[in-house]
Image (cartoon, coloured by chain):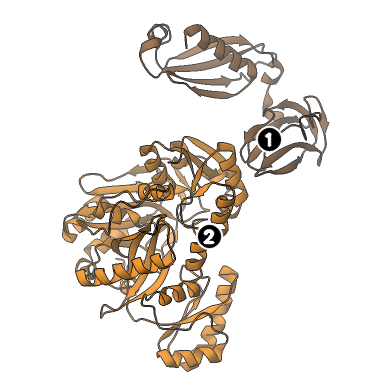
Amino acid sequence: MDYKEIEDLIRAIAASGATEVEIEAKDIKLIVKNSRGTQNFVAEQQQVVAQVMPMSQPAIQQVVQSVPQRQEVQVATKAELATTSEDSSRYIKVKSPMVGTFYRRANPQKPAYVNVGDEIQVGKVIGIIEAMKLFNEIESEVSGKIVKILVEDATPVEFDQPIYLVDPS
Amino acid sequence: MFKKILIANRGEIALRIIRTCKEMGIHTVAVYSTADKESLHVKFADESVCIGPPQGKLSYLNIPSIMAAAEITNADAIHPGYGFLSENSKFSQICKDHEIKFIGPSPEMIDKMGDKANAKQTMKDSGVPTIPGSDGLLYDIAEGIKKANEIKYPVILKATAGGGGKGMRIVNNDAEFEPAWESAKMEAGASFGNDGLYLEKFIVNPRHIEIQVIGDQYGKVVHLSERDCSVQRRHQKLLEETPSPFMTDELRTRMGEAAVKGAKSINYEGVGTIEFLVDSDRNFYFMEMNTRIQVEHPITEEVVGHDLIRRQIKVAAGLPLDHDNLFPTMHAIECRINAEDAYNNFRPCPGKIITVHKPGGHGIRVDSHIYSGYVIPSHYDSMIGKLIAIGRTREEAIAKMSRALEEYIIEGVKTTIPFHQQLMKNEDFRSGNYTTKFMETFELK
Protein backbone atom coordinates (compact mmCIF):
# COMPACT_ATOMS: atom_id res chain seq x y z
CA MET A 1 0.00 0.00 0.00
CA ASP A 2 1.41 3.40 -0.87
CA TYR A 3 0.76 6.62 0.99
CA LYS A 4 -1.92 7.82 -1.46
CA GLU A 5 -3.81 4.55 -1.05
CA ILE A 6 -3.65 4.85 2.73
CA GLU A 7 -4.89 8.45 2.57
CA ASP A 8 -7.80 7.45 0.29
CA LEU A 9 -8.65 4.58 2.59
CA ILE A 10 -8.71 6.86 5.62
CA ARG A 11 -11.02 9.33 3.84
CA ALA A 12 -13.35 6.53 2.79
CA ILE A 13 -13.50 5.21 6.35
CA ALA A 14 -14.20 8.67 7.75
CA ALA A 15 -16.97 9.27 5.22
CA SER A 16 -18.59 5.94 6.03
CA GLY A 17 -19.33 7.07 9.55
CA ALA A 18 -17.76 4.02 11.15
CA THR A 19 -16.49 4.74 14.64
CA GLU A 20 -13.47 2.50 14.64
CA VAL A 21 -11.89 0.43 11.90
CA GLU A 22 -8.89 -1.85 12.16
CA ILE A 23 -7.35 -3.27 8.98
CA GLU A 24 -4.53 -5.75 8.92
CA ALA A 25 -2.97 -6.51 5.55
CA LYS A 26 0.22 -8.32 4.65
CA ASP A 27 2.48 -5.36 5.14
CA ILE A 28 0.50 -2.88 7.11
CA LYS A 29 -1.82 -2.49 10.07
CA LEU A 30 -4.20 0.48 10.08
CA ILE A 31 -6.32 1.61 13.01
CA VAL A 32 -8.75 4.47 12.35
CA LYS A 33 -10.74 5.98 15.19
CA ASN A 34 -13.45 8.49 14.44
CA SER A 35 -13.85 10.90 17.33
CA ARG A 36 -16.77 13.23 16.85
CA GLY A 37 -16.53 16.64 18.46
CA THR A 38 -19.55 17.04 20.66
CA GLN A 39 -19.09 20.76 21.33
CA ASN A 40 -19.76 21.87 17.78
CA PHE A 41 -23.41 21.61 16.81
CA VAL A 42 -23.06 22.36 13.15
CA ALA A 43 -19.70 20.71 12.52
CA GLU A 44 -18.94 20.08 8.92
CA GLN A 45 -15.68 18.36 9.48
CA GLN A 46 -14.81 15.40 11.57
CA GLN A 47 -11.47 14.80 13.17
CA VAL A 48 -10.20 11.45 12.18
CA VAL A 49 -7.29 9.93 13.98
CA ALA A 50 -5.39 7.33 12.08
CA GLN A 51 -2.60 5.12 13.35
CA VAL A 52 -0.49 3.63 10.69
CA MET A 53 1.78 0.78 11.73
CA PRO A 54 3.93 -0.73 9.04
CA MET A 55 4.49 -4.41 9.77
CA SER A 56 7.45 -5.14 7.53
CA GLN A 57 10.21 -2.94 6.18
CA PRO A 58 10.54 -3.16 2.37
CA ALA A 59 7.76 -1.37 0.48
CA ILE A 60 6.88 0.97 3.27
CA GLN A 61 10.20 2.74 3.76
CA GLN A 62 9.06 5.97 2.03
CA VAL A 63 5.81 5.87 3.95
CA VAL A 64 7.61 5.42 7.23
CA GLN A 65 9.56 8.57 6.63
CA SER A 66 6.53 10.73 6.04
CA VAL A 67 4.29 8.86 8.49
CA PRO A 68 6.50 7.90 11.41
CA GLN A 69 5.59 4.65 13.13
CA ARG A 70 2.75 4.90 15.66
CA GLN A 71 2.43 8.64 15.33
CA GLU A 72 -1.11 9.95 15.18
CA VAL A 73 -2.03 11.55 11.85
CA GLN A 74 -4.81 14.11 11.81
CA VAL A 75 -6.82 13.95 8.61
CA ALA A 76 -9.69 16.41 8.36
CA THR A 77 -12.42 15.39 5.96
CA LYS A 78 -15.77 16.74 4.99
CA ALA A 79 -18.36 14.48 6.53
CA GLU A 80 -21.53 13.67 4.62
CA LEU A 81 -23.15 12.60 7.83
CA ALA A 82 -22.49 15.92 9.53
CA THR A 83 -25.92 15.99 11.11
CA THR A 84 -25.02 13.17 13.43
CA SER A 85 -21.98 14.88 14.88
CA GLU A 86 -24.45 16.86 16.91
CA ASP A 87 -24.63 16.05 20.60
CA SER A 88 -25.78 12.42 20.46
CA SER A 89 -26.19 11.82 24.16
CA ARG A 90 -29.91 12.58 24.00
CA TYR A 91 -30.50 9.82 21.49
CA ILE A 92 -31.46 6.29 22.52
CA LYS A 93 -29.37 3.41 21.27
CA VAL A 94 -31.45 0.48 20.15
CA LYS A 95 -29.25 -2.51 20.93
CA SER A 96 -29.19 -6.03 19.57
CA PRO A 97 -30.86 -8.52 21.94
CA MET A 98 -28.95 -11.45 20.49
CA VAL A 99 -26.02 -12.72 18.45
CA GLY A 100 -26.41 -13.29 14.72
CA THR A 101 -26.57 -11.62 11.32
CA PHE A 102 -28.60 -8.42 11.12
CA TYR A 103 -30.88 -7.79 8.13
CA ARG A 104 -32.71 -4.57 7.41
CA ARG A 105 -35.33 -6.26 5.24
CA ALA A 106 -37.33 -9.48 5.31
CA ASN A 107 -35.76 -10.58 2.02
CA PRO A 108 -33.73 -8.90 -0.75
CA GLN A 109 -36.89 -8.06 -2.73
CA LYS A 110 -38.67 -6.31 0.10
CA PRO A 111 -38.02 -2.74 1.25
CA ALA A 112 -36.14 -2.05 4.48
CA TYR A 113 -38.21 -2.21 7.66
CA VAL A 114 -37.09 1.28 8.65
CA ASN A 115 -35.07 4.11 7.19
CA VAL A 116 -33.53 7.26 8.60
CA GLY A 117 -36.30 9.70 9.42
CA ASP A 118 -38.98 7.03 9.99
CA GLU A 119 -41.13 7.18 13.08
CA ILE A 120 -41.25 3.95 15.07
CA GLN A 121 -43.42 2.77 17.94
CA VAL A 122 -42.95 0.15 20.61
CA GLY A 123 -43.51 -3.26 19.05
CA LYS A 124 -42.71 -2.26 15.47
CA VAL A 125 -40.49 -4.74 13.67
CA ILE A 126 -37.24 -2.91 12.93
CA GLY A 127 -35.11 -5.70 11.57
CA ILE A 128 -34.30 -9.37 11.55
CA ILE A 129 -31.44 -11.18 13.21
CA GLU A 130 -30.65 -14.58 11.86
CA ALA A 131 -28.79 -17.27 13.75
CA MET A 132 -28.48 -20.95 12.95
CA LYS A 133 -30.95 -20.65 10.06
CA LEU A 134 -33.61 -19.20 12.36
CA PHE A 135 -34.90 -15.72 11.59
CA ASN A 136 -35.91 -13.61 14.56
CA GLU A 137 -37.95 -10.45 14.10
CA ILE A 138 -36.60 -7.69 16.31
CA GLU A 139 -39.29 -5.48 17.79
CA SER A 140 -38.58 -1.98 18.96
CA GLU A 141 -38.78 -1.30 22.68
CA VAL A 142 -38.84 2.47 22.21
CA SER A 143 -40.79 5.07 20.21
CA GLY A 144 -39.26 7.89 18.27
CA LYS A 145 -37.55 8.79 15.05
CA ILE A 146 -34.70 6.86 13.47
CA VAL A 147 -31.75 9.23 13.42
CA LYS A 148 -29.05 6.85 12.28
CA ILE A 149 -28.54 3.28 11.17
CA LEU A 150 -25.40 1.92 12.82
CA VAL A 151 -25.20 -1.52 11.25
CA GLU A 152 -25.17 -2.34 7.54
CA ASP A 153 -27.51 -4.88 6.01
CA ALA A 154 -26.31 -8.51 6.37
CA THR A 155 -23.71 -7.72 9.02
CA PRO A 156 -22.91 -9.84 12.08
CA VAL A 157 -23.97 -8.32 15.39
CA GLU A 158 -23.23 -9.25 18.97
CA PHE A 159 -25.36 -8.97 22.11
CA ASP A 160 -25.92 -5.34 23.16
CA GLN A 161 -24.41 -3.94 19.98
CA PRO A 162 -26.12 -0.64 19.05
CA ILE A 163 -28.12 -0.97 15.81
CA TYR A 164 -30.08 2.28 15.61
CA LEU A 165 -29.91 5.74 17.09
CA VAL A 166 -33.41 6.93 17.90
CA ASP A 167 -34.56 10.42 18.82
CA PRO A 168 -37.27 9.82 21.43
CA SER A 169 -38.61 13.39 21.47
CA MET B 1 -5.98 -28.87 11.88
CA PHE B 2 -8.61 -26.36 12.92
CA LYS B 3 -8.35 -22.84 11.57
CA LYS B 4 -10.42 -21.10 14.17
CA ILE B 5 -11.50 -22.21 17.65
CA LEU B 6 -14.23 -20.52 19.65
CA ILE B 7 -13.64 -20.79 23.38
CA ALA B 8 -16.99 -21.22 25.13
CA ASN B 9 -15.72 -20.24 28.55
CA ARG B 10 -14.18 -17.43 30.55
CA GLY B 11 -11.53 -16.57 33.12
CA GLU B 12 -8.25 -18.41 33.47
CA ILE B 13 -9.20 -21.48 31.43
CA ALA B 14 -10.26 -19.36 28.45
CA LEU B 15 -6.87 -17.64 28.62
CA ARG B 16 -5.15 -21.02 28.92
CA ILE B 17 -6.82 -22.33 25.77
CA ILE B 18 -6.16 -19.12 23.82
CA ARG B 19 -2.45 -19.32 24.68
CA THR B 20 -2.06 -22.84 23.27
CA CYS B 21 -4.10 -21.92 20.19
CA LYS B 22 -1.78 -18.99 19.52
CA GLU B 23 1.21 -21.31 19.78
CA MET B 24 -0.41 -23.65 17.28
CA GLY B 25 -1.26 -20.83 14.85
CA ILE B 26 -4.99 -21.32 15.35
CA HIS B 27 -7.22 -18.24 15.35
CA THR B 28 -9.27 -17.69 18.49
CA VAL B 29 -12.73 -16.33 19.19
CA ALA B 30 -13.60 -15.32 22.74
CA VAL B 31 -17.21 -15.07 23.83
CA TYR B 32 -18.12 -12.95 26.81
CA SER B 33 -21.00 -11.67 28.86
CA THR B 34 -21.32 -7.94 29.41
CA ALA B 35 -19.77 -8.47 32.87
CA ASP B 36 -16.59 -9.80 31.26
CA LYS B 37 -16.04 -6.98 28.77
CA GLU B 38 -12.68 -6.07 30.34
CA SER B 39 -11.59 -9.65 30.86
CA LEU B 40 -8.14 -10.74 29.73
CA HIS B 41 -9.43 -13.61 27.59
CA VAL B 42 -11.40 -11.09 25.51
CA LYS B 43 -8.30 -8.94 25.05
CA PHE B 44 -6.03 -11.82 24.13
CA ALA B 45 -8.31 -13.49 21.57
CA ASP B 46 -8.16 -12.54 17.89
CA GLU B 47 -11.91 -11.89 17.82
CA SER B 48 -14.56 -11.57 20.46
CA VAL B 49 -18.34 -11.68 20.51
CA CYS B 50 -20.56 -10.44 23.32
CA ILE B 51 -23.13 -13.17 23.85
CA GLY B 52 -25.36 -11.91 26.62
CA PRO B 53 -25.88 -10.31 30.02
CA PRO B 54 -23.94 -11.46 33.11
CA GLN B 55 -26.15 -14.37 34.18
CA GLY B 56 -24.59 -17.68 33.18
CA LYS B 57 -27.89 -19.02 31.85
CA LEU B 58 -28.13 -16.11 29.42
CA SER B 59 -24.50 -16.09 28.34
CA TYR B 60 -21.97 -18.90 28.93
CA LEU B 61 -24.73 -21.49 29.20
CA ASN B 62 -26.73 -19.97 26.35
CA ILE B 63 -26.31 -22.54 23.57
CA PRO B 64 -28.07 -20.55 20.78
CA SER B 65 -25.96 -17.50 21.57
CA ILE B 66 -22.73 -19.46 21.47
CA MET B 67 -23.66 -21.28 18.28
CA ALA B 68 -24.63 -17.97 16.65
CA ALA B 69 -21.25 -16.55 17.67
CA ALA B 70 -19.51 -19.57 16.11
CA GLU B 71 -21.57 -19.05 12.96
CA ILE B 72 -20.85 -15.36 12.47
CA THR B 73 -17.13 -15.86 13.09
CA ASN B 74 -16.89 -19.06 11.05
CA ALA B 75 -15.30 -21.02 13.84
CA ASP B 76 -14.69 -24.65 12.91
CA ALA B 77 -14.31 -25.94 16.46
CA ILE B 78 -15.50 -25.06 19.96
CA HIS B 79 -13.49 -25.67 23.12
CA PRO B 80 -15.84 -25.80 26.11
CA GLY B 81 -13.18 -25.55 28.86
CA TYR B 82 -14.43 -26.89 32.21
CA GLY B 83 -17.76 -26.30 33.93
CA PHE B 84 -20.47 -24.50 31.91
CA LEU B 85 -21.29 -26.60 28.82
CA SER B 86 -18.21 -28.85 28.90
CA GLU B 87 -20.17 -31.93 30.00
CA ASN B 88 -23.45 -31.04 28.35
CA SER B 89 -24.25 -33.80 25.89
CA LYS B 90 -26.91 -31.67 24.22
CA PHE B 91 -24.28 -29.07 23.40
CA SER B 92 -21.93 -31.74 22.08
CA GLN B 93 -24.76 -32.98 19.87
CA ILE B 94 -25.69 -29.52 18.59
CA CYS B 95 -22.07 -28.86 17.64
CA LYS B 96 -22.09 -32.15 15.76
CA ASP B 97 -25.33 -31.23 13.96
CA HIS B 98 -23.79 -27.94 12.87
CA GLU B 99 -20.53 -29.55 11.75
CA ILE B 100 -18.51 -27.63 14.29
CA LYS B 101 -16.10 -29.90 16.14
CA PHE B 102 -16.78 -30.06 19.87
CA ILE B 103 -13.33 -30.42 21.46
CA GLY B 104 -14.32 -33.16 23.82
CA PRO B 105 -16.20 -36.44 23.84
CA SER B 106 -19.29 -37.41 21.89
CA PRO B 107 -22.79 -36.92 23.34
CA GLU B 108 -23.01 -40.66 24.00
CA MET B 109 -19.76 -40.76 25.98
CA ILE B 110 -20.87 -37.78 28.05
CA ASP B 111 -24.24 -39.37 28.79
CA LYS B 112 -22.66 -42.66 29.78
CA MET B 113 -20.40 -40.98 32.33
CA GLY B 114 -22.53 -37.97 33.31
CA ASP B 115 -25.21 -40.00 34.95
CA LYS B 116 -23.45 -41.19 38.09
CA ALA B 117 -25.51 -44.34 38.56
CA ASN B 118 -25.01 -45.29 34.90
CA ALA B 119 -21.31 -44.55 35.01
CA LYS B 120 -20.79 -46.82 37.97
CA GLN B 121 -22.56 -49.68 36.22
CA THR B 122 -20.53 -49.16 33.04
CA MET B 123 -17.27 -49.27 34.99
CA LYS B 124 -18.38 -52.28 36.98
CA ASP B 125 -19.22 -54.13 33.77
CA SER B 126 -15.72 -53.52 32.43
CA GLY B 127 -14.07 -54.84 35.58
CA VAL B 128 -13.11 -51.56 37.22
CA PRO B 129 -13.44 -51.83 41.02
CA THR B 130 -16.43 -49.84 42.22
CA ILE B 131 -17.72 -48.93 45.65
CA PRO B 132 -20.21 -51.52 46.84
CA GLY B 133 -23.71 -50.13 46.65
CA SER B 134 -27.10 -50.19 45.02
CA ASP B 135 -27.41 -51.26 41.37
CA GLY B 136 -28.67 -47.93 40.02
CA LEU B 137 -31.35 -45.79 41.65
CA LEU B 138 -33.10 -46.81 44.86
CA TYR B 139 -36.79 -47.41 44.50
CA ASP B 140 -37.75 -46.68 48.08
CA ILE B 141 -36.56 -46.50 51.70
CA ALA B 142 -37.17 -50.20 52.33
CA GLU B 143 -34.91 -51.18 49.45
CA GLY B 144 -32.31 -48.71 50.76
CA ILE B 145 -32.27 -50.13 54.27
CA LYS B 146 -32.01 -53.68 52.96
CA LYS B 147 -29.05 -52.76 50.75
CA ALA B 148 -27.38 -50.81 53.57
CA ASN B 149 -27.39 -53.85 55.77
CA GLU B 150 -25.98 -55.99 52.96
CA ILE B 151 -22.99 -53.73 52.35
CA LYS B 152 -22.71 -52.72 56.04
CA TYR B 153 -22.92 -49.23 57.56
CA PRO B 154 -21.78 -46.52 57.30
CA VAL B 155 -23.36 -45.80 53.91
CA ILE B 156 -23.96 -42.63 51.91
CA LEU B 157 -27.04 -41.61 49.92
CA LYS B 158 -26.07 -39.73 46.75
CA ALA B 159 -27.95 -37.82 44.07
CA THR B 160 -27.54 -39.40 40.63
CA ALA B 161 -27.49 -36.02 38.89
CA GLY B 162 -25.32 -34.57 41.58
CA GLY B 163 -22.01 -32.88 42.11
CA GLY B 164 -20.32 -30.37 44.36
CA GLY B 165 -21.35 -32.26 47.47
CA LYS B 166 -25.07 -31.59 47.09
CA GLY B 167 -27.77 -34.19 47.60
CA MET B 168 -25.50 -36.36 49.76
CA ARG B 169 -26.22 -37.73 53.25
CA ILE B 170 -24.18 -40.11 55.39
CA VAL B 171 -26.22 -42.77 57.23
CA ASN B 172 -24.76 -44.64 60.17
CA ASN B 173 -27.67 -46.93 61.12
CA ASP B 174 -31.27 -47.95 60.27
CA ALA B 175 -32.80 -45.24 62.45
CA GLU B 176 -31.02 -42.46 60.53
CA PHE B 177 -32.10 -43.78 57.15
CA GLU B 178 -35.54 -42.22 56.65
CA PRO B 179 -34.69 -38.62 57.66
CA ALA B 180 -31.51 -38.77 55.54
CA TRP B 181 -33.53 -40.03 52.56
CA GLU B 182 -36.12 -37.24 52.79
CA SER B 183 -33.47 -34.56 53.20
CA ALA B 184 -31.25 -35.79 50.35
CA LYS B 185 -34.19 -36.14 47.97
CA MET B 186 -35.34 -32.61 48.64
CA GLU B 187 -31.88 -31.11 48.15
CA ALA B 188 -31.27 -33.12 44.97
CA GLY B 189 -34.60 -32.08 43.50
CA ALA B 190 -33.89 -28.43 44.24
CA SER B 191 -30.27 -28.44 43.05
CA PHE B 192 -30.47 -30.58 39.92
CA GLY B 193 -34.15 -31.01 39.10
CA ASN B 194 -33.67 -34.76 39.54
CA ASP B 195 -34.20 -36.36 42.95
CA GLY B 196 -33.03 -39.85 42.07
CA LEU B 197 -30.79 -41.35 44.76
CA TYR B 198 -28.42 -44.28 44.86
CA LEU B 199 -26.56 -45.87 47.75
CA GLU B 200 -22.87 -46.50 48.35
CA LYS B 201 -20.66 -47.82 51.09
CA PHE B 202 -19.15 -44.84 52.83
CA ILE B 203 -15.40 -45.24 52.82
CA VAL B 204 -14.00 -43.79 56.01
CA ASN B 205 -11.13 -41.29 55.62
CA PRO B 206 -10.45 -42.01 51.97
CA ARG B 207 -7.96 -40.25 49.76
CA HIS B 208 -9.19 -38.73 46.52
CA ILE B 209 -6.76 -39.82 43.84
CA GLU B 210 -7.62 -39.36 40.19
CA ILE B 211 -6.01 -40.65 37.00
CA GLN B 212 -5.64 -38.49 33.89
CA VAL B 213 -6.47 -40.32 30.65
CA ILE B 214 -6.47 -39.38 26.98
CA GLY B 215 -8.18 -41.29 24.21
CA ASP B 216 -7.84 -40.69 20.47
CA GLN B 217 -10.36 -41.34 17.70
CA TYR B 218 -8.76 -44.70 16.87
CA GLY B 219 -9.43 -46.54 20.11
CA LYS B 220 -6.10 -45.87 21.82
CA VAL B 221 -6.27 -44.76 25.43
CA VAL B 222 -3.31 -43.90 27.66
CA HIS B 223 -2.99 -42.61 31.19
CA LEU B 224 -0.80 -39.80 32.48
CA SER B 225 -0.60 -40.96 36.11
CA GLU B 226 -2.33 -39.58 39.13
CA ARG B 227 -3.21 -36.41 40.98
CA ASP B 228 -3.95 -36.37 44.71
CA CYS B 229 -6.84 -33.99 45.42
CA SER B 230 -7.64 -34.97 49.00
CA VAL B 231 -7.37 -31.43 50.40
CA GLN B 232 -11.00 -30.42 49.97
CA ARG B 233 -13.41 -28.19 51.76
CA ARG B 234 -17.07 -29.10 51.26
CA HIS B 235 -16.04 -31.22 48.29
CA GLN B 236 -14.29 -28.28 46.65
CA LYS B 237 -10.63 -28.93 45.92
CA LEU B 238 -8.19 -26.45 47.42
CA LEU B 239 -4.86 -27.99 46.53
CA GLU B 240 -3.71 -30.78 44.24
CA GLU B 241 -0.36 -32.52 43.84
CA THR B 242 1.36 -35.15 41.79
CA PRO B 243 2.72 -37.70 42.42
CA SER B 244 0.47 -38.56 45.35
CA PRO B 245 2.45 -38.95 48.58
CA PHE B 246 0.38 -42.10 49.18
CA MET B 247 1.17 -43.66 45.80
CA THR B 248 3.38 -46.66 45.16
CA ASP B 249 4.56 -47.93 41.77
CA GLU B 250 2.39 -50.98 42.25
CA LEU B 251 -0.75 -48.99 43.10
CA ARG B 252 -0.15 -46.66 40.16
CA THR B 253 0.11 -49.60 37.80
CA ARG B 254 -3.16 -51.09 39.08
CA MET B 255 -5.03 -47.78 39.09
CA GLY B 256 -3.64 -46.76 35.70
CA GLU B 257 -4.73 -50.04 34.17
CA ALA B 258 -8.19 -49.73 35.64
CA ALA B 259 -8.57 -46.15 34.38
CA VAL B 260 -7.49 -47.08 30.86
CA LYS B 261 -9.79 -50.11 30.88
CA GLY B 262 -12.72 -47.97 31.97
CA ALA B 263 -12.12 -45.27 29.35
CA LYS B 264 -11.55 -47.85 26.60
CA SER B 265 -14.84 -49.56 27.44
CA ILE B 266 -16.72 -46.51 26.18
CA ASN B 267 -14.26 -45.80 23.33
CA TYR B 268 -13.44 -42.53 25.02
CA GLU B 269 -12.19 -39.65 22.89
CA GLY B 270 -10.47 -36.63 24.37
CA VAL B 271 -9.00 -35.86 27.75
CA GLY B 272 -10.77 -37.22 30.81
CA THR B 273 -10.20 -37.96 34.45
CA ILE B 274 -11.23 -41.02 36.41
CA GLU B 275 -11.65 -40.22 40.10
CA PHE B 276 -11.03 -42.94 42.66
CA LEU B 277 -11.38 -43.19 46.41
CA VAL B 278 -8.44 -44.96 48.02
CA ASP B 279 -8.73 -46.41 51.50
CA SER B 280 -5.97 -46.83 54.05
CA ASP B 281 -5.25 -50.35 52.78
CA ARG B 282 -4.67 -49.00 49.28
CA ASN B 283 -7.87 -50.52 47.91
CA PHE B 284 -9.24 -48.20 45.27
CA TYR B 285 -12.81 -47.71 44.09
CA PHE B 286 -14.23 -45.88 41.06
CA MET B 287 -16.04 -42.71 42.09
CA GLU B 288 -16.78 -40.81 38.89
CA MET B 289 -15.40 -39.84 35.51
CA ASN B 290 -15.05 -36.25 34.37
CA THR B 291 -15.30 -36.04 30.60
CA ARG B 292 -13.47 -32.73 30.19
CA ILE B 293 -10.18 -30.94 30.93
CA GLN B 294 -9.90 -30.31 34.68
CA VAL B 295 -8.89 -27.26 36.66
CA GLU B 296 -5.80 -29.04 38.04
CA HIS B 297 -4.45 -30.23 34.68
CA PRO B 298 -1.32 -28.01 34.96
CA ILE B 299 0.36 -30.19 37.58
CA THR B 300 0.18 -33.19 35.27
CA GLU B 301 1.52 -31.08 32.41
CA GLU B 302 4.51 -30.01 34.49
CA VAL B 303 5.51 -33.48 35.66
CA VAL B 304 5.10 -35.33 32.35
CA GLY B 305 6.21 -32.46 30.14
CA HIS B 306 3.22 -32.26 27.79
CA ASP B 307 0.74 -29.48 26.96
CA LEU B 308 -2.61 -31.15 27.66
CA ILE B 309 -4.68 -28.55 25.83
CA ARG B 310 -2.51 -29.09 22.77
CA ARG B 311 -3.03 -32.85 23.08
CA GLN B 312 -6.73 -32.27 23.40
CA ILE B 313 -6.88 -30.16 20.25
CA LYS B 314 -4.76 -32.60 18.27
CA VAL B 315 -6.89 -35.55 19.27
CA ALA B 316 -10.04 -33.64 18.35
CA ALA B 317 -8.50 -32.83 14.96
CA GLY B 318 -8.15 -36.55 14.31
CA LEU B 319 -4.46 -37.01 15.04
CA PRO B 320 -3.52 -40.29 16.70
CA LEU B 321 -1.88 -40.45 20.12
CA ASP B 322 1.85 -40.76 19.63
CA HIS B 323 2.90 -41.93 23.06
CA ASP B 324 2.09 -44.48 25.73
CA ASN B 325 1.40 -44.04 29.44
CA LEU B 326 3.34 -41.21 30.99
CA PHE B 327 4.79 -41.04 34.49
CA PRO B 328 5.85 -38.16 36.69
CA THR B 329 9.51 -37.15 36.50
CA MET B 330 9.11 -34.15 38.83
CA HIS B 331 6.87 -33.15 41.72
CA ALA B 332 4.20 -30.49 41.27
CA ILE B 333 1.73 -28.81 43.60
CA GLU B 334 -1.13 -26.48 42.69
CA CYS B 335 -2.79 -24.01 45.05
CA ARG B 336 -6.14 -22.68 43.91
CA ILE B 337 -6.17 -18.95 44.64
CA ASN B 338 -9.74 -17.84 45.30
CA ALA B 339 -11.15 -14.40 46.01
CA GLU B 340 -12.48 -15.62 49.35
CA ASP B 341 -11.99 -14.57 52.94
CA ALA B 342 -10.35 -17.60 54.52
CA TYR B 343 -10.92 -16.10 57.98
CA ASN B 344 -14.66 -15.74 57.44
CA ASN B 345 -15.76 -19.15 56.29
CA PHE B 346 -14.17 -18.67 52.86
CA ARG B 347 -16.86 -16.16 51.95
CA PRO B 348 -16.49 -14.97 48.31
CA CYS B 349 -15.09 -11.43 47.93
CA PRO B 350 -15.65 -10.13 44.43
CA GLY B 351 -14.49 -6.58 43.75
CA LYS B 352 -11.73 -4.50 42.24
CA ILE B 353 -8.16 -5.70 42.36
CA ILE B 354 -6.07 -2.63 43.07
CA THR B 355 -2.66 -4.24 42.61
CA VAL B 356 -1.38 -7.61 41.54
CA HIS B 357 2.18 -8.79 41.66
CA LYS B 358 2.55 -12.36 40.45
CA PRO B 359 5.42 -14.57 41.60
CA GLY B 360 8.04 -15.92 39.25
CA GLY B 361 11.34 -17.69 39.22
CA HIS B 362 12.46 -21.24 38.70
CA GLY B 363 9.75 -23.81 39.16
CA ILE B 364 6.84 -21.39 39.39
CA ARG B 365 3.88 -21.21 37.03
CA VAL B 366 0.89 -18.88 37.37
CA ASP B 367 -2.33 -19.51 35.42
CA SER B 368 -4.46 -16.48 36.10
CA HIS B 369 -6.58 -13.91 34.31
CA ILE B 370 -6.37 -11.12 36.87
CA TYR B 371 -4.50 -7.85 36.47
CA SER B 372 -4.18 -4.60 38.39
CA GLY B 373 -7.44 -2.73 38.05
CA TYR B 374 -9.46 -5.82 37.11
CA VAL B 375 -12.89 -6.03 38.63
CA ILE B 376 -13.86 -9.56 39.69
CA PRO B 377 -17.51 -9.99 38.69
CA SER B 378 -19.84 -11.42 41.30
CA HIS B 379 -21.70 -13.67 38.88
CA TYR B 380 -19.18 -16.47 38.53
CA ASP B 381 -16.99 -18.66 40.69
CA SER B 382 -14.36 -17.15 42.96
CA MET B 383 -11.22 -18.76 41.56
CA ILE B 384 -8.91 -16.00 40.34
CA GLY B 385 -5.80 -17.99 39.65
CA LYS B 386 -3.77 -21.16 40.06
CA LEU B 387 -0.28 -21.12 41.50
CA ILE B 388 1.83 -24.13 40.54
CA ALA B 389 5.20 -25.05 42.02
CA ILE B 390 7.45 -27.68 40.48
CA GLY B 391 10.46 -29.30 42.10
CA ARG B 392 12.61 -32.35 41.74
CA THR B 393 11.32 -33.58 45.09
CA ARG B 394 8.19 -32.92 47.12
CA GLU B 395 10.20 -30.94 49.68
CA GLU B 396 11.57 -28.70 46.93
CA ALA B 397 8.09 -28.12 45.50
CA ILE B 398 6.74 -27.18 48.93
CA ALA B 399 9.66 -24.79 49.50
CA LYS B 400 9.07 -23.13 46.13
CA MET B 401 5.33 -22.86 46.79
CA SER B 402 5.97 -21.24 50.19
CA ARG B 403 8.34 -18.76 48.66
CA ALA B 404 6.00 -17.96 45.77
CA LEU B 405 3.02 -17.48 48.05
CA GLU B 406 4.95 -14.81 49.91
CA GLU B 407 5.66 -13.02 46.65
CA TYR B 408 2.07 -13.21 45.41
CA ILE B 409 0.55 -9.82 46.22
CA ILE B 410 -3.13 -9.24 45.54
CA GLU B 411 -4.52 -6.02 46.99
CA GLY B 412 -8.12 -4.91 46.98
CA VAL B 413 -9.82 -8.24 47.65
CA LYS B 414 -9.33 -10.96 50.21
CA THR B 415 -7.81 -14.17 48.91
CA THR B 416 -7.00 -17.65 50.15
CA ILE B 417 -3.26 -16.99 49.97
CA PRO B 418 -2.95 -16.82 53.79
CA PHE B 419 -4.64 -20.22 54.02
CA HIS B 420 -2.19 -21.78 51.55
CA GLN B 421 0.77 -20.24 53.38
CA GLN B 422 -0.32 -21.98 56.58
CA LEU B 423 -1.08 -25.19 54.70
CA MET B 424 2.53 -25.33 53.47
CA LYS B 425 3.72 -25.17 57.09
CA ASN B 426 1.25 -27.80 58.36
CA GLU B 427 2.97 -30.91 59.72
CA ASP B 428 0.44 -33.41 58.36
CA PHE B 429 0.53 -31.85 54.93
CA ARG B 430 4.32 -31.73 54.88
CA SER B 431 4.55 -35.40 55.80
CA GLY B 432 2.02 -36.33 53.15
CA ASN B 433 -0.20 -37.66 55.87
CA TYR B 434 -3.62 -36.35 54.81
CA THR B 435 -6.97 -37.68 53.58
CA THR B 436 -10.24 -36.04 52.55
CA LYS B 437 -10.86 -35.53 56.27
CA PHE B 438 -7.92 -33.14 56.48
CA MET B 439 -9.83 -29.84 56.22
CA GLU B 440 -12.24 -30.87 58.95
CA THR B 441 -9.51 -30.55 61.56
CA PHE B 442 -7.37 -27.85 59.94
CA GLU B 443 -7.42 -24.66 61.93
CA LEU B 444 -6.56 -21.33 60.40
CA LYS B 445 -4.50 -19.21 62.77
Q: Position of residue B303 (x, y in %)?
A: 24, 55
Which type of secondary structure does the marked residue at label 2 adopt?
A: helix
Residue B52 visible in image: no
**Residue ID for mark 1:** A102
Secondary structure beneath dot 1 equals: strand
Query: Residue B442's mark?
Result: none
Amino acid at circle 1: Phe
Are there few (<14), some (14-19), or many (20+) residues within 10 Å of tag 1? many
Question: Which residue is located at x 22 percent, y 58 percent?
Answer: B328
Against B103, is B428 above or below?
below
Q: Position of residue B403 (x, y in %)?
A: 21, 52
Marks 2 and 1, how far apart in space? Answer: 32 Å
Q: Quadrant of the N terminus of chain B?
A: top left
Q: Residue at x 45, y 73 (%)?
A: B122
Give the residue type at disc 2: Pro
The mark found on residue B107 in the picture is 2
Instruction: Say whether residue B95 is left or right of residue B365.
Output: right
Q: Residue drawn at (28%, 53%), measured in percent from left and top?
A: B323
For the residue pair B348 and A125, the one nearer the viewer reads as: A125
Chain A: drawing colour: brown
Please report, as a chain letter, where disc 2 is located: B
Rendered orange, the chain in question is B
Q: Eyeballing the image, is B305 above or below B154?
A: above
